[in-house]
Amino acid sequence: MQTNTARIDVICASAPVIPVLTLENADQALGIGTALVNGGLKVLEITLRSDYGLSAIKQLKKALPDAIIGAGTVLTPQQYEACVEAGADFIVSPGCTAQLLLHGSQSEVPLLPGIATVSEAMAAMELGYGRFKLFPAAVVGGMDFLKAIGGPISQLKFCPTGGVKPTNAADYLALSNVMCVGGTWLTPAALVEQGDWQAIEALARQAAALAAP
Ligand code: 3PG
């Protein structure tokens, strides 16, 4: 089995931006998922924040064979396994617990664990992790945090999420320890309510044009 780091690297090299999605029903999931992939963003993080989350993972795995479907807001090993059964290609957690990290280190489906401190990163490194979601990025120091941790622990790479927007995404992506960024800005509530998938595709196209380092 490839290392968690190698598997996450392949996924995070596939698009500069990972849309973080909370999907409420099948029509919405298909409309948004198709728009994002057509716009050039093929890596999606579908959170478990809605009741439809797990079903959306199953649905989009079938409907969008070229997409890489991640499960987000995974808090427990039980949720991890439910997402694996649903077909998730990778798992994202907002933070990390010892249990979740251990579970991920034994799973065939890779984990992108969330961290917010250097100590959390170091604890996860002991289990072999080297790729992290920095969350909530803007709150815990954003680019300053990434630059600072890149000095002592330069081998780690991050997907910052939380407060990343079109106005700062390129600056994050320019950092040598940022592999991609995540965010909810691709699916503004108003566009989702109107079912304006074309506008979402246009936002995806702009995000896909951002260059990863
Ligand atoms: C996440 O779960 O990654 C965040 O909710 C995304 O944060 P954002 O809404 O600031 O992009």
Image: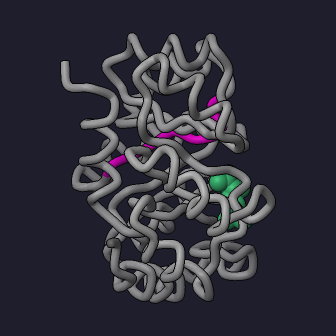
Is 189 located above or below residue 149 in the figure? below
Q: Quick check: is 197 in the magenta stretch? A: no
Q: Position of residue 4 (x, y in %)?
A: 33, 29
Query: Which image quarter holds the N terminus?
Result: top left
Q: Quadrant of residue 35?
A: bottom left
Q: Is residue 81 left or right of residue 128?
A: right
Q: Inspect this view and state whether residue 24 appears.
A: no
Q: Position of residue 48 (x, y in %)?
A: 65, 38
Nearest the eye: 138 or 23: 138
Residue 59 vs residue 187, the one in the foreground: 187
Ligand 1, image quadrant it occupies = bottom right
Query: Which residue is the extreme one toward the left?
Result: 1
Q: Which residues are magenta?
A: 68-74
Q: Is residue 31 visible?
A: yes
Residue under the point 65% across and 39% down: 118
Q: Nearer the viewer, residue 177 or 8?
A: 177
